[in-house]
Image (cartoon, grey):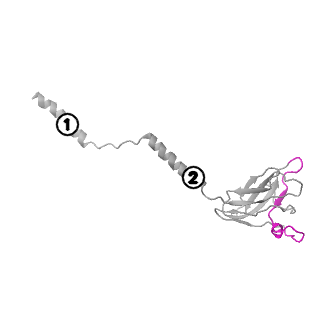
Amino acid sequence: MKKYLLFVPLAWLLTFCSTAPASQPTPDVSSIVNATLTAIAAGEQAMSSAPASGIEGRLSYPADTLPAMRIVAFQVATGQYYSVDTVAGQATYRLDGLPEGKYNVLAYTLGSDAVPAGLAGGYTQAVMCGMGPECTDHGLVDVIVFSGEITPGVDIVDWLQPNFPPMP
């Protein structure tokens, strides 16, 4: 009889263990971290492989040397602006990260001992005409930027318009 008393609790224990839901295996923490880092790296690679949108061109200034400048692209529809700074003597620029749209592009002197800050030059109709004496239209050109493309030839060489907008 004592033998049977020992089997009863054992039978209950076996019955309970066999009817209890099976526990799911816990994923290894290192595999979770590894999968997360892999997903982040794939997302960064996808973002970095997206083609840039922007503008680029030549710079000039009516003096012997080029001063440091701030190149500003004003979005025509919204007035929002994007900029990049150059260093003294830099003859070209590139402004990346522009949303698709139309822009007016200007350069502003950053100031030095020889050049005051805030003098403005632009990409105008006169630039497109060739900047000759017959080129009298100094109105800003609407530069179109398409998504994923760099718009070349936005040369800022017209410093003759006294009514460009002030540097933002």
Q: Is residue 151 visible?
A: yes
> Any mark on residue 74, and which?
none
Q: Which residues are magenta?
A: 112-137
The one nearer the camera, 49 or 109, is: 49
Residue 118 appears left or right of 76: right
Q: Which residue is mark 2?
A: 45
Residue 152 appears left or right of 42: right
Residue 116 on the magenta segment: yes
Outermost residue toward the top in this view: 2
> Any mark on residue 12, and which?
1
Cα–Cα span, label 2 and label 1: 57 Å
| Quarter of the C terminus within the rendering | bottom right
The one nearer the camera, 46 or 100, is: 46
The one nearer the camera, 17 or 88, is: 88
**How crowded is the residue under tag 1: few (<14 C-alpha within 10 Å), some, or many (20+)?**
few
Among the two numbered marks 2 and 1 on one chain, the one whose residue lies closer to the N terminus: 1
Q: Position of residue 136 (x, y in %)?
A: 87, 70
Residue 41 appears left or right of 54: left
Q: Position of residue 61 (x, y in %)?
A: 86, 57
| Quarter of the N terminus within the rendering | top left
Q: Quadrant of residue 5?
A: top left
Q: Is residue 168 visible?
A: no
The amino acid at mark 1 is Trp
With respect to residue 115, does 73 lie above or below?
Answer: below
With respect to residue 139, does 48 lie above or below?
Answer: above
Q: Position of residue 93 (x, y in %)?
A: 76, 56
Q: Residue at x 88, y 68 (%)?
A: 132
The amino acid at mark 2 is Gln
Outermost residue toward the bottom in this view: 134
